[in-house]
Amino acid sequence: MFFLVYHPLVARDIISINRDIRQRLAKAIPERLSSHPESYGKPLRGDLAGYWTLRVGDYRVVYRVVKHEVWIFAIINRRDVYSEVMNRLSWGASAQS
């Protein structure tokens, strides 16, 4: 079992998502990421190597698995998520220290 840890700005991400997608996310995230995060996600490459993405419709959940935790960095539309998550990476680096 994995414990889900959300970046503080994820709350802002969720506000802008329509209700139907929010409901799908509310079901998919705990169902998939708290049990087998690497089975459901797709590994990212390049600057985001070591991070994973879970697709829910046009939205992407970007996360990293650290021991028995899943750090969720962003839940954003696919067109914007990767540039936004690069801005949030320092949170994960400081949390590891």
Image (spheres, rainbow, N blue to C red):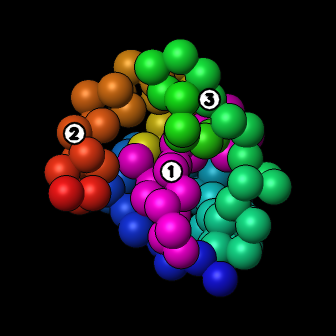
Where disc 1 sits, the SS reads strand
Residue type marked 1: Arg
Residue at 56% across, 46% down: 61
- Is there any visible trace of residue 27 in the rendered image? no
Which x, y percent locates residue 29? 63, 64
Q: Distance between the residues labelled 1 and 2?
A: 13 Å
The structure residue drawn at horizontal position 38% and vertical position 32%, both measured from the top left corner, is 85
Disc 3 on helix, strand or loop? Answer: loop
Give, as a single range, the part of the protein colored magenta. Answer: 54-73
In primary-sequence order, the first of circles 3 and 1 is 3
Q: Mark 3 points at which residue?
A: 44
Residue 23: in magenta span: no
Q: Which mark is residue 90?
A: 2
Amino acid type for the residue under numbered disc 2: Ser
Q: Where is residue 63 in the image (x, y as percent from the top left)?
A: 51, 49
Q: Do the residues labelled 3 and 2 touch (CB within 8 Å)?
A: no
- Determine whether 79 is above or below 30 in the image: above
Q: Position of residue 97 (x, y in %)?
A: 19, 57
**Residue carrying label 1:** 64
